[in-house]
Amino acid sequence: GGLGGDKTPMALTRLARTVAEAKPDAILLFFGANDAVIGRGRWRDEPLVSPDAYRDNLVWMVHFCRLKTSVRKFSIAPPTGRMEGVPATEFGDVRAPYLQAARDAADRADAVFVPLDEAFDAVRAGLHPDERGCMLTEDGIHPNTRGAQLIADTLLKYWNLDR
């Protein structure tokens, strides 16, 4: 399970043990929002997690979970693309290299890649150009109800469990 403010270096230290205790049938790694912004802006006092470190941490998480569990179905989902509202202005498009790093991690770890960034971009493309602010998030980073539903629908699609 994820924790508020979690980043892949922290998750890497506990994930295999936590997952082994839960005995899941499949594992989704959905990290990256914090990895992309920590070390910048208002969080510049914390160490930066580079896109390469983020990618490698995801690969190691899959590897450790394979060693500690019988799970063979892994999915990796990146951050949900561009931030909205104030964080978009404060941080700009810092997530782009992390999105690619998540794709690379899925390839390296033989995991299903779930393109949440593309799903969010497709919805945003359909919004009126004058709409501003937070359409899919509560605060520019964390999904609101509409964003959470989009995440769930996208996961179900890529897991072949469409409703």
Image (spheres, helix red, strand yellow):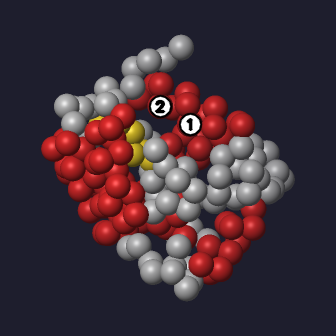
Cα gap from disc 1 to disc 2, whole angstroms: 6 Å
Can you name the residue that lies furthest to the right here?
130
Tell me, yes or no, whether the two marked residues, 1 and 2, touch with CB atoms within 8 Å: yes
Q: Is residue 25 above or below residue 125?
A: above
Image coordinates of residue 65 in percent, x first then y, are 24, 44
Q: Is residue 118 above or below residue 95?
A: above
Q: Where does the image place residue 122, in percent across and percent down from the top left?
A: 59, 41
Q: Is residue 143 in sight in this rendering? A: yes
Q: Farthest residue to the top: give it.
A: 163
Number of numbered discs overlaid on the protein picture: 2
Q: Residue at x 34, y 50 (%)?
A: 15
Name the foreground residue: 126 vs 53. Answer: 53
Residue 151: numbered disc? 1
Which label sits on residue 19?
A: none
What is the residue that sits farthest to the front in this orientation?
A: 21
Residue 26 in percent (x, y) is at 33, 30
- Answer yes or no: is residue 76 visible: no
Q: Residue at point 26% right, 62% down?
A: 56
Mark 2 sits on what residue?
155
Coordinates of residue 152 in the picture (x, y in percent): 55, 31
SS for dot 1: helix
**Type of the residue with mark 1:** Ile
Say which of 118 and 1 sits in front: 1
In the image, taking residue 68 as reference, residue 154 lies left or right, namely: right
